Structure formats: structure tokens, C-alpha cells
């Protein structure tokens, strides 16, 4: 009669050690990848602004389509991409100047969907020209970009 052998031995200590090291390395790799996706800094994530630009008779109308920021925290920066020269910089909350105006649709002091910014071209007394790059900044962080004002 054939007897079935019963083996009570587990995995050898060498194999067990190799498996434990391999699992530890894989988990450490997963942890590193996860931590690299977290925002840096003090933990505050800037809300990116959704922007749509259209040419109008006096310049460009920038419509806010997404995001929300306090207008006092946001700076409008326009540069000439060919030369890198800064054309104009102003705080969005103070926008009632000759170069443009901020239309706060809800009058709540925030930049949010429904608001718009009119940037005047040279012919209308402003300094903006077609092809300029526009950035919206919160501190040093870029929260919205228009790569080129359309012609």
C-alpha cells in the first residue's frame, strides 16, 4: 500500500528571508512614488484658474471658467515672450487702471467663474499686444497661464 508522505516543514529560512526583503523593497518603492505625488510646501494647494481668452475691439477679454482665488492674492503678469521683458504687472484686485479692468461679477472679492478681465491693447490706451504671454500668480506660484494673446 502506498503511503502519502506528510511534510510538516515550512519554507526554508533562506527563502523566507529573500521573500521578506523583496516585499520590503517593493513596499518602499510604492511609498516613494506615492510621496512624490503629494504637493510640496506647507500643504496648501493652489487652485488653478481656468481661463478663456477672446479678442475684442479694445483688446482681450479673459473669462474665468474655473477655480477660485481671493482677488487680493493674485497678480497679473504680462511678458513679451520674444524678449522676456515684463510688459506690465498689477494686482488683480486693483484692476481699474488704464491697462485693464477686473469685472467681479458677484462683487465678493474673489476671482471665480463668471468673472472677467479686460486687457486693453495699445490702440485703446493699454500696453498689451498680440503674442504677449499672460500669467496669473499667487505669490511665486503660477495658477493660470495664457500662452499667447490672440491676434
Image (cartoon, grey):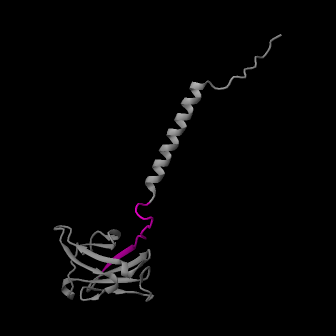
Of the pair 8 and 88, the residue shown nearer to us? 8
Q: Is residue 43 magenta?
A: yes
Residue 10: x %, y % from top left:
67, 25
Of the pair 4 and 41, the residue shown nearer to us? 41
Residue 139: x %, y % from top left:
33, 72
Please identify the residue farthest to the right as the structure is shown. 1
**69 shown above or below 41:** below
Of the pair 25 and 69, the residue shown nearer to us? 25
**44 shown above or below 107:** above
Q: Residue at x 40, y 78 (%)?
A: 64
Does residue 117 appear to the left or right of 65 in the view shown? left
Q: Is residue 122 magenta?
A: no
Q: Quadrant of residue 65?
A: bottom left
Does residue 11 appear to the left or right of 124 in the view shown? right
Q: Is residue 150 visible?
A: no
Q: Residue at x 43, y 61 (%)?
A: 39
Residue 18: x %, y % from top left:
54, 30
Residues in magenta? 39-55
Does residue 138 appear to the left or right of 126 in the view shown? right
Of the pair 70 and 13, the residue shown nearer to us? 13
Q: Is residue 104 visible?
A: yes
Amino acid at each position: 500500500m502506498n503511503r502519502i508522505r506528510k511534510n510538516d516543514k515550512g519554507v526554508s529560512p533562506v527563502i523566507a528571508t529573500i521573500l521578506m526583503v523583496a516585499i520590503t523593497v517593493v513596499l518602499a518603492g510604492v511609498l516613494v512614488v506615492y510621496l512624490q505625488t503629494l504637493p510640496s510646501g506647507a500643504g496648501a494647494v493652489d487652485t488653478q484658474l481656468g481661463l478663456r481668452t477672446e479678442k475684442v475691439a479694445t483688446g482681450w477679454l479673459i473669462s474665468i471658467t474655473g477655480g477660485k482665488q481671493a482677488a487680493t492674492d493674485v497678480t497679473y503678469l504680462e511678458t513679451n515672450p520674444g524678449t522676456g521683458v515684463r510688459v506690465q504687472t498689477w494686482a488683480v484686485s486693483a484692476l481699474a487702471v488704464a491697462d485693464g479692468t477686473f469685472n467681479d461679477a458677484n462683487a465678493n472679492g474673489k476671482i471665480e467663474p463668471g468673472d472677467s478681465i479686460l486687457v486693453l491693447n495699445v490702440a485703446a490706451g493699454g500696453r498689451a499686444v498680440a503674442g504677449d504671454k499672460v500669467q496669473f500668480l499667487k505669490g511665486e506660484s503660477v495658477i493660470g497661464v495664457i500662452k499667447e494673446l490672440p491676434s
